[in-house]
Every structure is written in C-alpha cells, then in structure tokens.
C-alpha cells in the first residue's frame, strides 16, 4: 500500500470517516487499523465471523 507504520493512524481516521452508518457491520478504529496494518505488511486477511454482522436490534 505504500504506507509507513506511523501513517496508519491517519489513514485509519480517513477511512473511518467514510464508513457509512448503513454498513452491514459496525467497524471500530482498532479493527480498521489492524486491517490496514495487515495490508501494509502483506499479511493474509483475517476472515470475520458472520455473527459479527449487524442486526436490526443493534444500535448504529
């Protein structure tokens, strides 16, 4: 991705600002930073269990 480790927090902030409230799954800053960090390092993505999907009862 071309990002240095010290740039990940800023990149994460920019991405999180674009995640819509209607996203099927709630996304946290820590999760997004981990995802971006793994991508920068070339690590294998980690699958998300289906139980993590948002349901209508969960607040947005």
Image (spheres, rainbow, N blue to C red):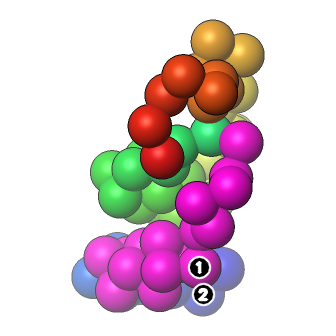
- In this view of the protein, which residue sits in the foreground, 13 or 22? 22
18 within the magenta span: yes
* Residue matched to label 2: 2
Q: CA distance from mark 2 to mark 1?
A: 20 Å
Residue neighbourhood size for the residue with mark 1, other residues' Cα within 10 Å, grouped as few (<14), some (14–19), many (≥20): few
15 within the magenta span: yes
Left or right: residue 33 versus residue 43 is: left
- Report if residue 10 is visible in the image: yes
- In this view of the protein, which residue sits in the foreground, 32 or 43? 32
Residue 16 percent across, percent down from the top left: 48, 72
In the image, the segment drawn in magenta is 8-24
- Report if residue 48 is visible in the image: no
On screen, residue 39 above or below 56? below
Outermost residue toward the front? 57
Left or right: residue 35 versus residue 34 is: right
Quadrant in the rendering for residue 49? top right
Mark 1, secondary structure of its residue: loop
> Which is closer to the viewer, label 2 or label 1?
1
Residue 59 percent across, percent down from the top left: 44, 37
What quarter of the picture does the N terminus occupy?
A: bottom right
Residue 25 percent across, percent down from the top left: 62, 40
Residue neighbourhood size for the residue with mark 2, other residues' Cα within 10 Å, grouped as few (<14), some (14–19), many (≥20): few
Task: Specify the label residue 18 is tagged with.
Answer: 1
Q: Residue at x 39, y 50 (%)?
A: 28
Mark 2, secondary structure of its residue: loop
Q: Residue at x 38, y 79 (%)?
A: 13
On screen, residue 2 above or below 18? below
Residue 21 percent across, percent down from the top left: 58, 60
Left or right: residue 45 versus residue 14 is: right
């Amino acid at each position: 991705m071309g990002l240095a480790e010290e740039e990940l927090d800023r990149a994460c902030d920019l991405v999180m600002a674009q995640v819509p409230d209607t996203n099927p799954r709630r996304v946290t800053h820590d999760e997004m930073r981990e995802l971006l960090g793994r991508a920068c390092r070339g690590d294998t993505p980690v699958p998300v269990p289906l139980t993590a999907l948002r349901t209508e009862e969960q607040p947005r």
